[in-house]
Image (cartoon, coloured by chain):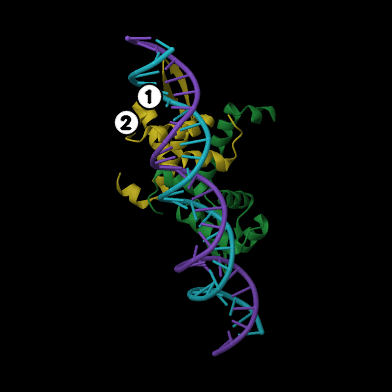
Chain colours: A yellow, B green, C cyan, D purple
Amino acid sequence: MKCLSYTQFFEVIANKTRLRIIESLFRSPKSVTEICNDIKEEQSKVSHNLKILTDCSFSEFKKDGKKRVYSLNEKTIIPLMNIVDKHAASHCKKCQMLK
Amino acid sequence: MKCLSYTQFFEVIANKTRLRIIESLFRSPKSVTEICNDIKEEQSKVSHNLKILTDCSFSEFKKDGKKRVYSLNEKTIIPLMNIVDKHAASHCKKCQMLK
DNA sequence: ATAACATATGATTTTTATATCATATGAAAT
DNA sequence: ATTTCATATGATATAAAAATCATATGTTAT
């Protein structure tokens, strides 16, 4: 992994497509094609973004024949999402109303 | 605060200027002019970015005469930075070498 | 060896975010 | 009431990131 600054770290996850990939992989590990089908996005877009995620160790893959099965680095992602949820819960009035 | 999506949450902190403001406020609360001097940035740039941070409750301010003294929402920021540090420590070889 | 499938990569266009500049607002001092 | 200091805001220009499209690479099956 390249040595990330705080800015770089957050830039990687501050992106709608990448967060949808993360959501998808959170449900279960998947090949590129499966991710495309799941989130309804084009293959090269997904591959480009998977590279960005993987370069920074937010995801990883293992080879399976001609497929690459990607999975999530949950150790970082889950605590991260918990902080966002907590922040929203204590600062966003609209969010609190929805509970 | 407006109701933030994950993307919006991360977009706010995925910015060099805003992270420098955060660092500055982490050291101590400051007025806008003081922040400008501290991080060597122009006033309107700092104000624009403080608004973005404050709208999302990453910072807040109290009035003091004609000044506004900004401070940090440490409850969110500190755990967040800890996760980044931890991620870097376990995935970045270069970072580990520096220890 | 070639075809078919799965995925990656490079170059360019398009979109989005950021900085900048000029100006407005607000609050205290004279 | 006017000047000065502190900060905010709006519009536009600039820069940066993302999407897109075409194509390349790698892997298995025939």
In the rendered image, residue A25, in percent from the top left (x then y), is placed at: 39, 28
Q: Is B55 on the left-hand or right-hand side of D15?
A: left
A79 vs A99, left or right, is: right
Instruction: From the viewer's perspective, tell me whether residue B78 is left or right of residue D29.
Output: right
Q: Is residue B59 visible?
A: yes
Name the image quarter holding the C terminus of chain B.
Answer: top right
The amino acid on which the numbered mark 2 sits, given as a three-letter code, is Asp
Residue A38: image tag: 2
Report the quarter where the N terminus of chain B lies. bottom left
**N-term-proximal mark, 2 vs 1:** 1
Q: Is residue A12 above or below residue B45?
A: above
Residue closer to the observer: B98 or D14: D14
Q: Are labels 2 and 1 on one chain?
A: yes
The three-letter amino acid code for the residue at tag 1 is Lys
Q: Residues within 10 Å of mark 1 (few under 14, many from 20)?
A: many
Residue drawn at x 67%, y 56% is B38
Q: Nearer the viewer, residue B61 or D8?
A: D8
| Residue A29 seen anywhere in this rendered image of the structure | no
Badge 2 element: helix
Marks 2 & 1, CB-CB < 8 Å contact: yes
> In the picture, residue C28 is in which quadrant?
bottom right
The x, y position of residue B81, in whole percent, is 56, 40
Q: What residue occupies the far left of the structure in this picture?
A: A98
Q: How many marks on residues?
A: 2
Residue tagged 1: A30
Residue B71 is situated, as x and y percent measured from the top left of the image, at 56, 55
Q: Which mark is residue A10?
A: none
